[in-house]
Image (tube, rainbow, N blue to C red):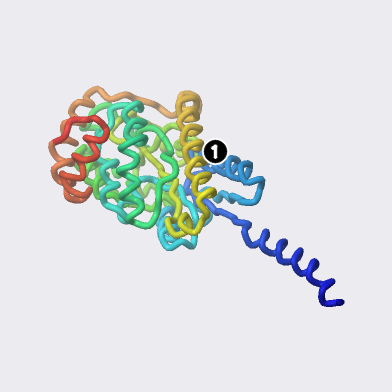
Amino acid sequence: MKNFKLIPLLLAAFLIWGSAAQALTLRIGAGDPENSEMGVVGNTFKKFIEEKTNGKVKVECFYSASLGDETECLRNVQKGSLPIAIAGIANLVPFESRLGILTLPYLFDNLDEVVKGTNGAPAELLNSYAIKAGFRILTWTYTDFRYISNSKRPITKMSDMQGLKFRVPQSAVLIAAYKAFGGSPTPISWAETFTALQQGVVDGQCYGYIGFRANKFQEANQKYLSEVHYTYQLQPMIISERVFQRMDPELQKLVIEGGKVAQKAVLEYQIKEAGAAKEQLIKDGVVISKLEDEDQWKKAAMEKVWPEMMSFVGGRDAVNAYLKACGKPTI
């Protein structure tokens, strides 16, 4: 009889253990500081998931490359040892070349085109490429055009690029673009960028206003910034496909929905805060310039960079498939 009395206790213990076993913590590795667009994405996603699961699923966000640089985080996501990461699109290209389409200079003319190119059919096409590489895209983080800054002089025309060394990501497309514009590109990891600028290893870099302010590049000799619209900086938040497939269907739906909520939040944040960040940088002494000859930059991109980099980003068919999905003319 005593053994029968133990059954309710054992059953209760089993239920408690089972509930604990279903608990989950999702870690997010991000390269930028929390007071950036990445912070908006990570914190919005965290709030959504924890509220919708009543705290059963925890989300921990690690900013400023505290889990390693972006490439390291992406490798870990691909392996499944890190559930989620937020990284610049150029750093995803080594894992899936066709995502490099988004790095082609002057692919987008304005923010409306960027938003169209990261939703609906274009987004589904890009995600199909990502899944084959072992991860899926939950959020497109909008972080403005990659405006060019430097420590030497204002850049108002393409000839001003001559003799300047610029930090770029490890991206063949961006390297080719800077060469076409007359600058000298130097691939440097994101984690080492601030120090490289501070020590004069390179003269400049490229980033949007919010990211520039969040990373305090004005304190790394970046005195001059030019509004060059050659590429829009997209920073996808990706989840490991291995981790995703281990989730039950209900949680999968929540994760996808949370990504969309975060994408909407960061777009609103970008539209609202970019102007304020620009004003603050001007107050901090950063000289901001506009180009006098941007048509020449675009011409150099289309005539030199696109033909040279076509095979690197998956070939003409892949580029045209994306352009068609976006409703843009094919080439």
Q: Nearer the viewer, residue 63 or 120?
A: 120
Query: Could one spot residue 167 in this view of the protein?
Result: no
Q: Nearer the viewer, residue 57 or 104?
A: 57
Question: Does residue 115 appear in the picture of this structure?
Answer: yes
Whether residue 80 sits left or right of residue 160 in the image: it is right
Q: Which corner quadrant holds the N terminus?
A: bottom right
At a point 71% along the width and 62% down the height, the residue shown is 15
Question: Foreground residue, 19 or 66?
Answer: 19
Residue 149 position (above or below residue 166): above
Residue pictured at 22% horizontal, 36% vertical: 323
Question: Which residue corresponds to the image point at 43% horizontal and 32% vertical from the top-left?
Answer: 209
Q: Position of residue 87 (x, y in %)?
A: 42, 48
Q: Quadrant of residue 112?
A: top left
Residue 6, x across and y down, in percent: 82, 72
* Amino acid type for the residue under numbered disc 1: Asn
Q: Which residue is mark 1?
A: 35
SS for dot 1: loop
